[in-house]
Amino acid sequence: MQSEEQAQQSETQGQRLHPISLLFGIGTAAWGLLLVVLFSPVNSPFVVGVLLLPAVVSSLLRYISFRYWLGPDEMVIREGILNRNERHIPYAHIQNVDLIQKPLHRLFKVAVVRLETASGGKPEAIISVLTLPSIADMRAKIFHERTERATLDGGYPASEHQLLELGPTELAIFGAISNKGLVLVAAAFGLAAQTGYFEDPRWLRALALIETNSPLIMAPDSPSQVLLLALTGLVAIVLILRLFSVLWAIVKYHGFRLVLEEDDLRAEYGLLTKVAATIPRHRIQLITLHLTPLHRLFERVSIQVDTAGGSSEDQGGPGGSLERQWLAPILPRAQVRKLLRQIIPECHLEGLTWQPISARAWRRLFRRWLILLVLSTAAAVYGIGLWGLALVIPGLLLAYLHAQLYAQRTGYALTPSAVLYRSGCWVRRLSIVPFGKIQALDLRQTPFDRRNAMASVHADTAGASARGHRVAIPYLDLGIARQVFEQLDLETGRTAFRW
């Protein structure tokens, strides 16, 4: 903690970044130049030095000009020499104070700080880097002011309660379920291709040796051996991808903990890059449960959230990217209701009565698949001749099955405090929106809806991602759609909205 004399000095002169921030700024630029040297013909030391010089000067000027103050009610950030920028951020508007520590950050006991407000999008400020005691002082000041206001407003009492902790077994299951291994392998192949690894004579000689000594490849005329080789290769690729995915999950989410502290959810995780992300509970706008076939096989669920004040998309920056939409990367299905009850206690999810969409919805879905099937069959016939017609019967069966299952498993439910919407056939999603978080209601009709006397009902929130699973209930008979719209409008109107 600061002494009284240091505190008075910081109030007048402001507080600086840690001097090590110069090293991180120059290091980031040097890493970018290293990639340029690897993937371009520019490899002259003089050229590299000339390109690195502006980064060194920029880091130095940023360190000299950057100041921040922690006032009684707001935080002030001032930076810039030629173009000066001064931002005043009231503590009441700061929703998230996130910490990111990469291995070098932990070595020097510093961290990157991301401040997010209710505006969403990119962070309000990214401070790189501060010492851990300085960050503790900042968090204490910001959240102390919030705690005092919450107490006056009848908010949640001060407490800390661990809601979820994921061990290596759960993370391994999460890695096996996800498909991140494909991204890692693709990145490795791209790097190898760019560096000319595949053109190395040693690689080519090894490949030729394998082809010469493999009994399967030596006899490619045997259909059984060709089929066995293809199946073996496919199984090997799947296993390798899953192994990489498991390693990715264990490294990225090592030590995952979800803690409830007063009215804030705090997620901590990471083996190499450690992240401490804050999710204000009252800012959660939408909760989505994800179930793929592998989720159902392992009896697991993944839970994401959209918040007002945080971006649901990955954002880069000096601190890397945050995936703040993950509330629980993996969770046993038996624990879902307990966790949701602790996060949104006003929403009771027991005894739900699911309402289906229109009984005629499957026909519209089937017709959409028929159009795709006709185009695919035409392309196959053009490419391989009449053998392409073999797609017709399996395609018809698959389209009919998908349309029936999708229509049967899509529906909605209304509780006294929230609206729920589920959809999907193979990959299923269920979204929950409390009435107090609905900002706009829409009753929409496309030309095809009007032709079939149908409509869809959309409930928009402050934090809904365009790519996420929003509450947009489709294929409702027009009369039912109007009833649902009016009921949601009534419930939303008499529920107090709270950011």
Image (spheres, rainbow, N blue to C red):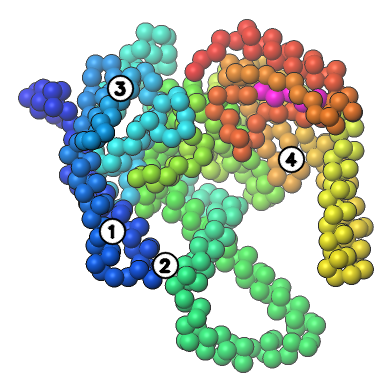
Q: Which mark is residue 51?
A: 1
* Screen quadrant of the N terminus: top left
Q: Could you tell which of marks 1 and 4 lies nearer the N-terminus?
A: 1
Between the residue at mark 2 and the residue at mark 1, the CA separation in whole angstroms equals 16 Å
Residue 50 lies in what quarter of the image?
bottom left
Q: Secondary structure at mark 2?
A: helix
Q: Secondary structure at mark 1?
A: helix
Q: Nearer the viewer, mark 2 or mark 1?
A: 1
> What secondary structure predominates along the stretch shown in magenta?
strand
Q: Residue furthest front?
A: 82
Q: Secondary structure at mark 3?
A: strand
Between the residue at mark 1 and the residue at mark 4, the CA separation in whole angstroms equals 51 Å
Q: Residue at x 27, y 55 (%)?
A: 27
Q: Is residue 246 above or below residue 263?
A: below
Is residue 370 left or right of 16 when viewed as pictured?
Answer: right
Q: Residue at x 54, y 63 (%)?
A: 186
- Which sits in the foreground, 112 or 342? 112
Residue designated by label 3: 88
Between the residue at mark 3 and the residue at mark 4, the CA separation in whole angstroms equals 45 Å
Q: Nearer the viewer, mark 3 or mark 4?
A: 3
Q: Which mark is residue 39?
A: 2
Crowding at mark 1 (Cα within 10 Å: few <14, some 14-19, many 20+): some
Residue designated by label 4: 424
Q: Secondary structure at mark 4?
A: loop
Q: Is residue 468 above or below residue 226?
A: above
User: Residue 61's spot in the image, x, y percent?
Assistant: 20, 42
Q: Magenta residues, as a range?
A: 455-459
Residue 286 lies in what quarter of the image?
top right
- Which sits in the foreground, 144 or 255? 144
Q: Is residue 444 above or below residue 19?
A: above
